[in-house]
Image (cartoon, rainbow, N blue to C red):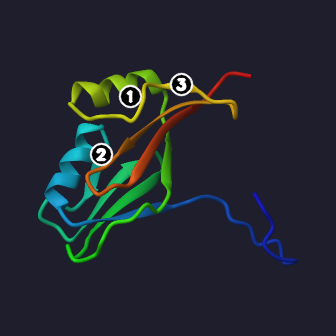
Amino acid sequence: MVDLNSEGVRIESISALTLATTDMAKTVDFYQLLGFELAKGDAKAKFVTFRAGGQYLNITAESPERSPCWWGRAIFYVNNVDAMYEKAISQKLKPEFPPRDAVWGERYFHLVDPDGHELSFARRLPA
């Protein structure tokens, strides 16, 4: 944790990440295929929440006039990167590359959701 000021206020964790979509039904289906547990809302809702461990992934429906652009990457730690990759492949999803070990000490792969949000599924490598 990092001190933000002399009073010792610290950022402890991320509670939730919110991503935008122009097609809620397609996006809900995508995340459910990956095994995300739907916590609130459904494919017809304007706002949906999935559980992501002890945190949340929110999806908000936005106007199709908004043009997508690369915004960054959400990184989800999973218990087995290779099994998650196989799950994605078995659901006919298209990861950018097979799992690989990174010099920074993680095994990971990337996948892009229907709205162009880049997702990384990772696990720390044993020391």
Tell me: 31 left or right of 9: left
Query: Which residue is nearer to you in this view: 57 or 19?
Result: 19
For the C terminus, the quadrant is top right
Tag nearer the camera, 2 or 1: 1
Q: Which residue is mark 1?
A: 84
Q: Are marks 2 and 3 in contact (CB under 8 Å)?
A: no
Residue at point 21%, 30% (across, down)? 91
Rendered position, 68 above or below 97: below
Rendered position, 104 above or below 46: above
For the N terminus, the quadrant is bottom right
Tag nearer the camera, 2 or 3: 3
Instruction: Say what amino acid the circle numbered 1 marks.
Output: Met
| Residue 52 percent coordinates (x, y) | 42, 48
Nearest to N terminus: mark 3 or mark 1? 1
Calculate the distance from the C-alpha at mark 3 to the C-alpha at mark 1: 13 Å
Q: Which residue is mark 3?
A: 100
**Mark 1 nearby-residue class (10 Å; few <14, some 14–19, many ≥20):** some
Q: Are marks 2 and 1 in contact (CB under 8 Å)?
A: no
Instruction: Say what amino acid the circle numbered 2 marks.
Output: Glu
Q: Which residue is mark 2?
A: 37
Instruction: Say what amino acid the circle numbered 3 marks.
Output: Arg
